[in-house]
Image: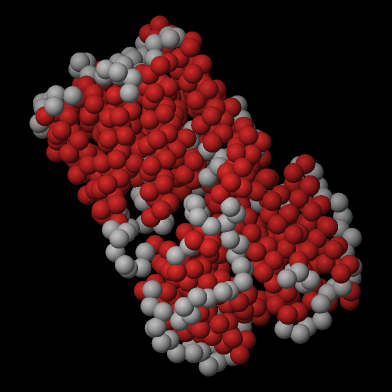
Amino acid sequence: MGATRAAAGNWLSRALAPSREPLPWLGAARAAVAFGTVTAVALALDEPRAGLLAAAGMVLATMRPDIGPYRSRALGLAASQLAGAAGLVVGQFAHGHGWGTVTATTAVALLSGLVSSIGTIASGASLALLFMNVIGTGLPGPGEWWLPPLFQLAGGAFYIVLAVLSWRPWRHRPGPEHRAVADVYGRAADLVDAAPHPGGARTALSMAVDTAQDALMCHRVRDKKHWGEETRWLVAMLNAATPLLEALTLLIRSARPAPPGLAEAVRRIADAVRSGNRDAGTAPFRGDPAFARPVEFARLRLSEAHPEDPDWLGLPRPLPARAYRAARMALTSAAAWRYGLRLALCMAIASAFVEFPGVLHDLWIPTVHSLWLPLTVAVVLKPDFGSVFVRSLLRAVGTVAAAVPTLLVLVAVPRGWAAVPLAALFGGLIPVLKARSYAMRTVAVTPLMLFLFDMTSPQPSDELVLARLSDTLLGCLIVMVFGYALWPWSRRVRIGERFTAGFGALADYLDEAFTGPRNVRARDRRALHRSLDAVRADLREVQSEPPPAGRAGAAWWPVLGALDALVDTVTAASVKVRGGAEPPPRRAARAISADLREMAAAVRDGRPPRTPRLPGPSGEGVLGEAAVQIRRLHRTLPL
């Protein structure tokens, strides 16, 4: 954990460091074909503005993550296109109305900010809504009001067709869901190899379970009784990993090496799940019975035609209940309103500059394509792209880095059919560079959008690039001042909320760990791990903030480490009790649970927690070590 805190100090190098993920060459080829084809069709029909709108729809699609189950990818692409079309229609009707345009843009921005809190697909759709709304308010549409959204949807649909063809979901072969569940067993084998010093293997395993659970259960419209046989089998295999994960918790807590052959036995199960081979004929593990039982449990599930395992991970609620919960979250979440108001304020300022260009003219800022100003604000202030401060900085740097070579290309290459290979080149760069970092994402999108606008603009190319550069820098300045500097406690509040939820989830788990049914305990523990993974993700995001926010975030890392250790201790105690150990006195469990809720309230209120009233070691039984860790946790809280 010390290395993580040390890395938090070098926030700029962390922000600029490129990702080591494999480059998506298939996605690059798909984008190159899509943008090249649309540009060629637009030139052949002499409809550059229609081509620009179609390309905008494809930009929305290329910015979507190309990971996860096919249904989630397709739903994300479709939702973004429909939301973008709605935003484009609203923007057209608001175009050229002065303060009416500013009001409409502000309202759309507030709605976009609230919807962003629901989930990843809603977040992408909200960005598309705002993105296309800005284009609608900034550019007069070609013809009737319904033509621009039709062109945008046509471009997006073309890209979706190419995406589906590249996924080939009709193949009767294992898909992303198989890989996600297999990764759980693979990460479990990695943890076995790492014992007795797990390092990051424990966190990787927890995140793999999160990913697999999302892959199997998120965005499902039909209920369990209508699931396919393969889905039921995968859910059963994911559930079957639960006893193994509990046994591995005991292994790590014991600080002893893993039994020989255990990792290989778990990897054989992972390979069978990854290939979808239910008749893999994996050999049983003959070692320590404490591990042989959970491995055999999972191994036998491989060949079961209709496994009926208990619901240990939690099945999704009915669709109406999920929709109601999402709507309530968007309308009642304090974090959603904070973000929505920040976004609405910044977009109102940017839109006012565009609608009243005399202000920009007095500041000597060219406005050839001033819609870049609100576009910059919308993209930079997106909450799940990372730190607002760092995104503002990196977008400015990325735009400057891309503007000069783009200017040279636009000046050197005449307008016309030479645009086709250039559009294919610039479009193909987006998936490759966006996978590396946010700055490279900007470097990729900037030349493509400049190039597309150059096709429709009567202005000289050098003025277009200069306007793009100045509007981007001004947009970043607006975000830095009105979206960041005026909200100095926004990051700390979010971390506090995450930790409050983590303390509360651990208290809920402790209430059921020794007395509740096993399926309830398993679901509570899974919810607890998801909560702590969210805390971990937030802390990593804060690491890229400059001081003092980065230092404040680093101060919470020891708290997360203590919480992780406490979760493992309670889990190990629960497994021991199921194995025959004497359960702890109810008063001991209740005292620790009450103290966790007190710490949650202290974090929420920003005050030191009250002194815990815990029984002595002789009255705590298997929770003796947990009580010691609770006292240590009190000392680590930076309150």
Coloring basis for residues? secondary structure
Vertical arrangement, residue 457 with respect to residue 219, above or below: above
Q: Residue at x 81, y 73 (%)?
A: 624
Q: Is residue 588 left or right of residue 356?
A: right
Which image quarter: residue 583? bottom right
Nearest the viewer among 232 and 411 is 232
Q: Say whether residue 169 is visible.
A: yes
Q: Residue at x 32, y 43 (%)?
A: 62
Front residue of 108 and 478? 108
Name which residue lies at 56% across and 82% down.
297
x, y percent for residue 325: 62, 44
Residue at the image position 49 percent from the left and 68 percent from the top: 232
Q: Quadrant of the N terminus?
A: bottom right
Percent coordinates x, y for residue 190 in the rendering: 48, 74
Q: Is 247 in front, or is 156?
A: 156
Quarter-of-image position of residue 379: top left
Q: Is residue 191 visible?
A: no
The residue sitting at the bottom extreme is 286
Location of residue 170 in the rendering, given as x and y in whole percent from the top left corner: 30, 60
How many marks can you see?
0
Q: Is residue 217 left or right of residue 405?
A: right
- Rendered image quadrant of residue 629: bottom right
